[in-house]
Image (tube, grey):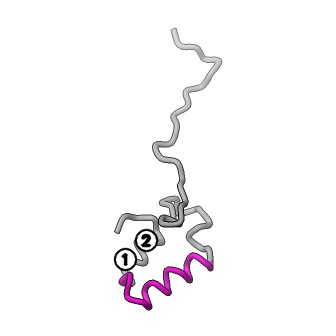
Amino acid sequence: MQNTDHPLVIPMEDDILHTKSHPFCSDPTCPCHEDPELLSDVARAVEQGLFTPAEATRFVEGKAL
């Protein structure tokens, strides 16, 4: 018999994680995707040839390069 006093809670698979090397997460609602300082760093990396524009977009979206 199932205990109905406690609802079933399913934890998220991955915690949202922001690090120096991965400042953008995969949650599209997270404010990291609009942080002017972080976006400026990515724009600078594109200007320096470290990222292509497509790679920069994927990086800001929190997707693997």
In the image as oriented, which residue stretches furthest toward the bottom? 47
Asked if residue 60 is among those painted magenta in the image, a careful observer would answer no
- The residue to which callout 1 is attached is 55
Compared to 21, does 49 lie above or below?
below
Numbered range of the magenta stretch? 36-52
Kind of element beneath mark 1 = helix
Q: Position of residue 59 (x, y in %)?
A: 43, 71
Given residues 12 and 6, the one toward you in this image is 12
In reply to whether residue 42 is colored magenta, the answer given is yes
Q: Is residue 48 above or below residue 38?
A: below
Label 2 sits on what residue type? Answer: Phe
Residues 55 and 2: in front is: 55
Image quarter hosting the C terminus: bottom left
Question: Residue 36: x, y in percent?
Answer: 62, 79
Single out the residue that lies furthest toward the top. 1
Amino acid type of disc 1? Glu
Residue depicted at x 62% and y 74%: 35
Q: Nearer the viewer, residue 29 or 46?
A: 46
Disc 2: which residue: 59
Q: Residue at x 53, y 81 (%)?
A: 41
- Where is residue 63 drawn, in percent x and y? 40, 64
User: Residue drawn 52% across and 48% down?
Assistant: 15
Crowd tier of the residue under label 1, counting other residues whose Cα lies within 10 Å: few below 14, some 14–19, many 20 or above:
some
Could you give the CA–CA distance between mark 2 and mark 1, rounded to whole angstroms?
A: 6 Å
Disc 2 to disc 1: CB gap under 8 Å? yes
* Left or right for 49, reference 37: left
Quarter-of-image position of residue 18: bottom right
**Residue at 55% from the left image edge and 79% from the top image edge:** 39
